[in-house]
Amino acid sequence: MLCDYVKIFIKAGKGGDGAVAFRREKFVPLGGPSGGDGGRGASVILVGDSNLATLNDFKYHPHYKAEQGANGMNKNMNGKWGEDLLLHVPLGTVVKDALSGNFLVDIAQEGQEVMVAKGGRGGRGNARFATLKDKAPAYSEKGEPGEETTLVLELKLIADVGLIGFPNAGKSTLLSRITAATPKIADYPFTTLEPNLGVVQLADESSFVVADLPGLIEGAASGIGLGHRFLRHAERNRLLVHVLDMSEFAARPPYESFTMINEELKLYKEDFLKRPMIVAANKSDMPGFEENLEELKDKLDGKYEIFPISALTGAGLQPLLWRIKEILDSTPVLPYLPPVDVVRNTVVRAEAPFVIEEKETGFWQVGGIRVEKLVQRTDLENEDAVLRMQRIFVKMGLEEALRTAGVAPGDTVNIAGNEFEYTE
């Protein structure tokens, strides 16, 4: 069964920790620092793959965690970088942020790569902190955590032509006649519960892709029946072929069916009706066809091309297919939105280096990407590393800002999930 909507959790790899190590050399304090840097954590990357047709793999495995970077080593040896996690998705996959619903990227090309979670930077080893004043630093940095987020993957099939119409109009029969596809065909409504794709091969060796889309009912644009499951897959079609049941056994008059389907298209996405559309007047082998055809031509008044066909017997199909080819040749491929380089978490960060907020009496929260990353990279078990962090806080003005905000000795200050007792 086609899986066209999934929600996945992804987490990039943490950067490796920097090392604290010393050489054994005469006349060099403590042998000289020689701790190497930690490796970068692996990123999570989505890759467009034309060999895939569904999102089934993600349905059964919704959690993904990339490899961590290796820790730094002595003798100034850096840790190994984590190997990026590549997640292959079918062409036509739209990626959204699960929390906000914001569009992030449309993956529509073979081999297109998009980084959706960036790996954490590796921590620096103690060799990187040696100065004239401190020739043998006994501290290093910890690796940064990788980004993590929850994404929605939504598949919108890429097909040149979409067959639209009410249930039992003959769309599946038509697809089976003009392509090698074998959709389920029966004489009851909603036989087709998922889109089917087929490739039409013409005598001049040209071809195009046709999608038999699940039948609509009134109210589909608001989610009734198959609702959005159908309409999602019509968004990429360059040409819509409206298949109408023209027999006397049809559930409703052909023109009424035509207008109702078009209204659902308009309600879902107004530009649907701006795309080329032709009418396949189906079931020419059934009673009542000629009368209904004349009535339909009269009411459409030449606004749409009408092709009388019988999907069952094959009558009239060749003129229809050649006209479809002519329209596609003059209709450009619908543009897809360009990919972004990196999709980051949607947490809103203040532009200031830090933001101070009193959550309750005696408890303060400090936010800001600079201070949070500094705390995350600091080994809080290492006294020298903590002293360095405090010196940086003073330089960036955080200590003065805390006093100005009203923080008193003994109050608790939380930064990046770590609690500190404020002292002057």
Image (cartoon, rainbow, N blue to C red):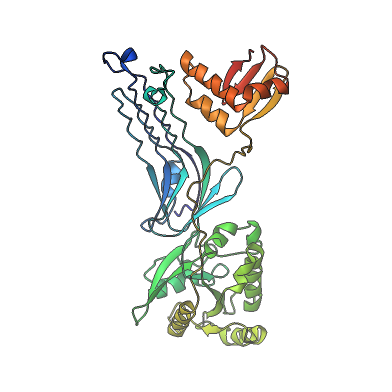
Please give the name of the residue rendered at 65% of the width and 25% of the height, measured from the top-left corner: 365
Whether residue 252 is visible here, answered yes or no, is no
Residue nearest the observer in this picture, 260 or 399: 399
Q: At which x and y percent is residue 157?
A: 47, 61
Tell me if 106 is positioned left or right of 348 in this view: left
Please give the name of the residue rendered at 37% of the width and 19% of the height, measured from the top-left corner: 20
Tell me if 353 is positioned left or right of 207 in this view: right
Q: At which x and y percent is residue 279?
A: 55, 79
Please give the name of the residue rendered at 57% of the width and 79% of the height, measured from the top-left corner: 246
- The quarter holding residue 423 reads top right
Residue nearest the observer in this picture, 302 or 118: 118
Q: At which x and y percent is residue 290?
A: 57, 87
Please give the name of the residue rendered at 38% of the width and 75% of the height, measured from the top-left corner: 207
* Number of marks present in the image shown: 0
Residue nearest the observer in this picture, 255 or 416: 416
Question: In the picture shown, does residue 283 fall above or below 162?
Answer: below
Question: In the picture shown, does residue 389 fall above or below 226?
Answer: above
Q: At which x and y percent is residue 23?
A: 29, 18
Residue nearest the observer in this picture, 236 or 260: 236
Q: Quadrant of the C terminus?
A: top right
Question: In the picture shown, does residue 137 fall above or below 107?
Answer: above
Whether residue 338 is visible here, answered yes or no, is yes
Tell me if 269 is positioned left or right of 283 in this view: right
- The quarter holding residue 244 reads bottom right
